[in-house]
Image: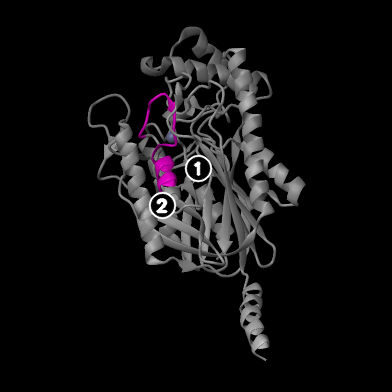
Amino acid sequence: MKMIARLFAVVMPMAAAVADVEWKAAAAKVVITPAEPMILSGFAGREVPAEGTAMDLFAKSLVIEDAAGGRLVIVTLDLVEVPAQLRSVIAAGLKTRYGLAGEALLMNCSHTHCGPELRYTELEFLGLDPGRRERCLRYNAWLEQRIAGTIDEAMGRLEPVAIAHGRARCGFAMNRRLKNDQPGGEPYLNRPNPDGVVDHEVPVLTVKDSEGRLEAVVFGYACHNTTLNFKLWHGDYAGHAQQLIEESHPGTLALFMMGCGGDQNAYPRSLPVFSFRHGQSLATAVEAVLDAGPKPLHGTLRIGWDTARLTYESIPTAAEIEGRLATGAGYEPAYATYLRRWDEKRLYAIRNGGLRDHYDYPVQVVRFGEDLTLVALSGETCVDYSLRLKREYRGPGALWVAGYSNDVLAYIPSQRVLHEGGYEARRAMMYWSNPLHPSAFADTIEESIMGTVGRLLGP
Ligand SMILES: [Zn+2]
């Protein structure tokens, strides 16, 4: 009798635990620091190979499965961008190996400027030496394999978990668009603007196993990872924050998800110590959420995916470009080299199939039951998007807005930023060749993206 009672005491809670499994999850990480000398990405004019590693770069994958078998795969990268081609390869692998639809994959990059260049198209190799091309292609293939490896590892050991969401705040991000009061030049300068709009929210998703151990924590922040501009591999403040969280919670994986930080910089910057301090401050905000106790998430996953049709201000003709290239007329002296290079690429594109006349901009919406909705926007999304979405959101549950997801195709200005002008509005377009854009975006961009998000969120 005593024996049976003991057996029941052991068996009953286990049976209850199995019946209660709402979520399963697992996470894995891998180093993606280039083994070969590669060019650093991010800052125009710093086209030099990295001289070494100050901090390893990581790819991390978190697979979440609901009780109905629905799956979400989150991949975060300590890299400057998520090229559409990279995402396609990873999504195709998910389809083949797990039968998962592409919309189940959410890829986000930290936008560190101390990571390697990512080049996928022949257009991007125009004028570059063949050795550089080969190194880029080798890195792409290696990276794809490494990322797929982390997904397979996580898929292979899904276990019952509890997931929860909470929020804190962190203050080092500052708006970086300062109105230029001097005559001439850019209307807005890339300088700290303490009066500008910011989004200081730190959304956090926690994953705990059945024993309450923290398996993974995903956290977001809307700010460029540009504190550092040295010639070493490094994850910048997001790298420090992830490392500090993982050190404080052995066995936990910390995944940074970039928010709408297109027009946000960390200040102060340039010195490595500031990168560390910003990372510390962000990690502390995450700890605040862990300490306060995030709210458990219930229900099932519902994932929506659609594209917004973005159009352009104008589409140049071959004759216009040939005229500029022949005479040099119309190139602002300070940017002549880059403008000329952009024209050469646009002309190459026209002669090899034509310039695009629109861009299908991916929008992804992930719902965790009625408790949390995650909107993942593509591109270097400016902060107006997350602020507006949070202002207009009517629920249910909390809203998390990530930028820099799935296809980092260009800066994504709001209508306000586009009308104001400056770097994020149009200047940055000339540096972009994957994809190559014919001109700045038309000023319908914000309504187009917001309309698509609205349709995915439903009434
Ligand atoms: Zn940027």
Q: Quadrant of the N terminus?
A: bottom right
- Callout 2, which amino acid? Ser
Side (left or right) of 96 relative to 305: right
Q: How many residues crowd mark 2 within 10 Å: few (<14), some (14–19), many (20+)?
A: few
User: How far across and down, in percent of the image, does residue 115 sit?
Assistant: 48, 30
Specify whether tag 1 is near ligand 1 (CB below 8 Å). no
Q: Nearer the viewer, residue 255 or 248?
A: 248
Please tell me the numbered disc located at residue 248.
2
Front position among marks 2 and 1: 2
| Pointer 1 residue | 404
Disc 1 element: loop
Q: Quadrant of the C terminus?
A: bottom right
How much space separates mark 2 and mark 1, taking CA atoms? 27 Å
Split into quadrants, the picture shows ligand 1 in the one at top left
Q: Is residue 339 magenta?
A: no
Specify whether tag 2 is near ligand 1 (CB below 8 Å). no
User: How far across and down, in percent of the image, does residue 56 sit?
Assistant: 48, 34
Side (left or right) of 158 relative to 111: right
Q: Residue at x 68, y 44 (%)?
A: 91
Highlighted range, magenta: 227-244
Q: Residue at x 40, y 18 (%)?
A: 335
Q: Nearer the viewer, residue 107 or 435?
A: 107
User: How far across and down, in percent of the image, does residue 356 sit?
Assistant: 62, 31
Picture quarter containing residue 265? top left
Disc 2 element: helix
